[in-house]
Image (cartoon, grey):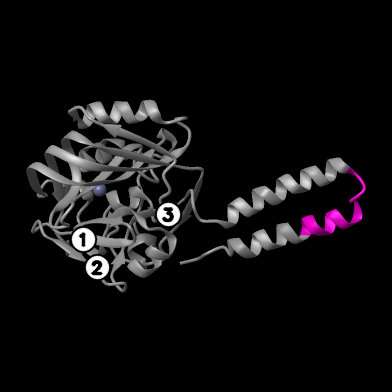
Amino acid sequence: MKKINLYFLIMIISLSMLTAGCVSEQTEDVEAAENNMEDAASTSVTQTDTIYQFSVIDALLEGVYDGEITCAELKENGDFGLGTFDGLDGEMLELDGVIYQVKADGNVYKTNDTETSPFAAVTFFETDIQEDINTEMTGQGLASYIEELLPSKNLMYAVKITGNFSYMKTRSVAAQEKPYPRLVDVTKDQSVFEFNDTEGSIVGYWMPEYINGINVPGYHLHFITADRTAGGHILDYTINSGTIEIDSCDSFYLELPENENYLSTGLSADNEGDLEEAEN
Ligand code: ZN
């Protein structure tokens, strides 16, 4: 994995601003501009409001399932998120800094820090918008309701919904052997789970259309029950009551795999039909 040393870069920018300040501290305009830039630089240093993503969704669609990033590394970049595991062994969900694995057998496993993932997106969740739900709503109804709450369709959002669900339908996928099949072929044999009157948390993202190829445009949501015994990638649900929390994210950090599976796989330019079929 190649990482640009972001902090080092920011330090250089900050240092050059300090130098600039020394030679021109007489003018108020420069000072004001400098202060604004320092504010901007200090926001960049914090990792909140940044979505950290490993690999791209098009790679997953093409069967790049070799795990590379460890759960420990994911936790360094966020306490909330979703993804999958080495060999496509189940659905990943991170909530409050704990990474869970919902396997195709329907059980939820707590993960070790050394376990790896081929694709994941995490963030340090901070609630920017909060709304309570007190009427029954279908997943589609709630999706439209949440979209009304978003200040702009041009940002990215982490979405957390905690509540009671009269219906929940999820899926998980089984670990794959090489040569890896494409994701649409794996999901034809996915395990589907249905729950009635369950309590739990929805964890996921709403992403803009322009993210196509890199992540899933619109919603991508995973679920885990309050007792952490069941869950998966959400296919459908109905909520009775609960709380929506939205974290507005204005920064996106993409890290690409360097393993042979990723490097040698041709990534198609147009996977929209496949994405629809594999995710919904
Ligand atoms: Zn998923």
Disc 1 C-beta below 8 A from ligand 1: no
Disc 2 C-beta below 8 A from ligand 1: no
Give the amino acid at mark 3.
Answer: Phe
Quadrant where the C terminus is found in the figure: top left
Considering the numbered disc 2 on the image, is that residue within a helix, a strand or a loop? loop
Indicate left or right for 34 with 128 as reference.
Answer: right
Callout 3 touching callout 1 (CB < 8 Å): no
Give the amino acid at mark 1.
Answer: Gln
Residue 158 position by quadrant: top left
Residue 153 position by quadrant: top left
Q: Nearer the viewer, residue 5 or 162?
A: 162
What stretch of residues is rendered in magenta? Answer: 16-27
Is residue 124 positioned above or below 207 on the image? below
Residue 85 position by quadrant: bottom left
Q: Residue at x 29, y 62 (%)?
A: 98
Whole-percent x, y for residue 201 in the image = 23, 47
Whole-percent x, y for residue 261 in the image = 32, 63
Quadrant where the N terminus is found in the figure: bottom left
Callout 2 touching callout 1 (CB < 8 Å): yes
Q: Residue at x 11, y 60 (%)?
A: 107
Packing grade of label 1 (10 A; few <14, some 14-19, many >=20) is: many
Considering the numbered disc 3 on the image, is that residue within a helix, a strand or a loop? loop
Ranked by sequence position, the earlier of labels 2 and 1 is 1
Give the amino acid at mark 2.
Answer: Thr
Whole-percent x, y for residue 170 in the image = 14, 45
> Which residue matches tag 1?
101
> Which residue matches tag 2?
111
